[in-house]
Image (tube, rainbow, N blue to C red):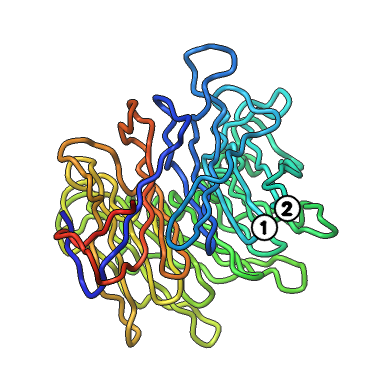
Amino acid sequence: MSTLGVDEWWEQKVGADDGAAGDVFGFSAAIDGDVALIGAAQGTAAPTGTSNGGPGAAYVYTRTARLWSFAQKLVPSDGTDDDQFGYAVALDGDTALVAAAFGDVGKNVNQGAVYVFTRGPGGWTQVQKLVADDGAAGDQFGWSIAVDGDLAIVGSRGSDIGANGSQGAAYVFARAGGTWTQAAKLVDSAGAANDQFGYSVALHGTTALVTIPNGDATQGAAVFFDGAGGTWTQGQRIAADDGVAGENYGYSVAFDGTTALVSSPFATVGNPFQGAVYAYEKTGGTWTQTQKLVADDGQFFDVFGIALAVDGDDAIVTAPFFDASNGTAYRFVRSGGTWTQADKIVPADAVSGQGSAFGYAVALSGGSFVVGQALANNGNAYQGAAYFYEPAPTDAIFANGFEAAQ
């Protein structure tokens, strides 16, 4: 069930205690130390009693002595059917962001919003709702989000820029005195209609990375922005050195200071739509592509790179449609400047043909990671699940290389 390298892994499966059919728990994920946040973008029964999806929810988990336990369910103060609260989540210390990318703002349908929660002695509390100061219907503000300290960035892939429909934008927010304020609106200087700039975003310090999967004549690109001094300026533009139109370069991005990973999940690598991830490193102020990562057992329509995460010399890349949409995740380790596939991760309870999309989301922190399985029939159809992994002690390792939590 799993191909392992030098490490063995402790696995723990979690799901919402109040989960229901169609919740898609595991649609998004974030982790920071001993705290994790799992999005269920259609969770909580539709409040109007319709057949629509619920407004969405996000679930907080905390870790004590390797065991992850449910801590709190986050819901928006003004959620309505099909807002998809939990579409994207971000976490940094005592701050959590949860996006409702399809939320209506006033009469603007699907404008989108992002909710800010902070942790205090009594748990997590919603403190603010972020919207774009020039938001419009169909923007889908919150399609992607990232937070680092007192800065946050929100992707708005459907934003019109002038006459260019769905060119896309990204909004930077800064926190001062406990209040978040819009600080900048980022757009691509070479943008065109339907680029979807802001599809994926990442943030480290005052450097942001924003992707454009339909940019550059649909070949895709990603752009760095520098916000040092409070003024955000467009910097280097990167793209796959062997890119082809339609490969969705920029579908997902991960960024850790001097390392960036950008995925092309529709790339042909021996097989159509097998997928690839491009690794970049910053040297002397310039970003250079150093490697192209692919799965050693890639197949047709794996869409390797749908979700990815990087933390130092560790990276996780998912392929949720591997093996007829059962899904898998791959761990890559960097040594001597070279990334090598170290582990292939499949849940210990995986059932062939289930189509549960293990790898719909992933997050990584300090060697531990969580993988979302949004389409899992976990008691109910598409209720969803998530799996936590961390290096296990050498005792009681199962034959497949995993040890299940008790």
Seen in the image, is 345 located left or right of residue 44? Answer: left
Residue underneath mark 1: 94
Q: Residue at x 51, y 71 (%)?
A: 256
Label 2 to label 1: alpha-carbon separation:
8 Å
Q: Around disc 1, counting alpha carbons within 10 Å, would you say few (fewer than 14), some (14 to 19), or many (20 or more)?
A: some
Residue 292 image position (x, y, % from top left) = 29, 70
Residue 213 image position (x, y, % from top left) = 44, 51
Residue 250 image position (x, y, % from top left) = 43, 56
Question: Considering depth in this image, is 153 or 284 the residue closer to the camera?
Answer: 153
Seen in the image, is 347 located left or right of residue 50? Answer: left
Seen in the image, is 82 located left or right of residue 405? Answer: right
What amino acid is labelled 2 in the image?
Gly
Residue 103 image position (x, y, % from top left) = 62, 31
What amino acid is labelled 1 in the image?
Asp
Mark 2 in CB contact with mark 1 (< 8 angstroms): yes
Question: Considering depth in this image, is 21 or 160 the residue closer to the camera?
Answer: 21
Quarter that holds the N terminus: bottom left
**Label 2 element class:** strand
Q: Residue at x 49, y 85 (%)?
A: 283
Q: Nearer the viewer, mark 2 or mark 1?
A: 2
Badge 2 or badge 1: first in the primary sequence = 1
Q: Which residue is drawn at 25% across and 50% down?
A: 347
Q: Is residue 111 above or below residue 208?
A: above
Residue underneath mark 2: 120
Q: Which residue is drawn at 18% across and 59% down?
A: 398
**Label 1 element class:** loop
**One can see residue 140 in this view:** no
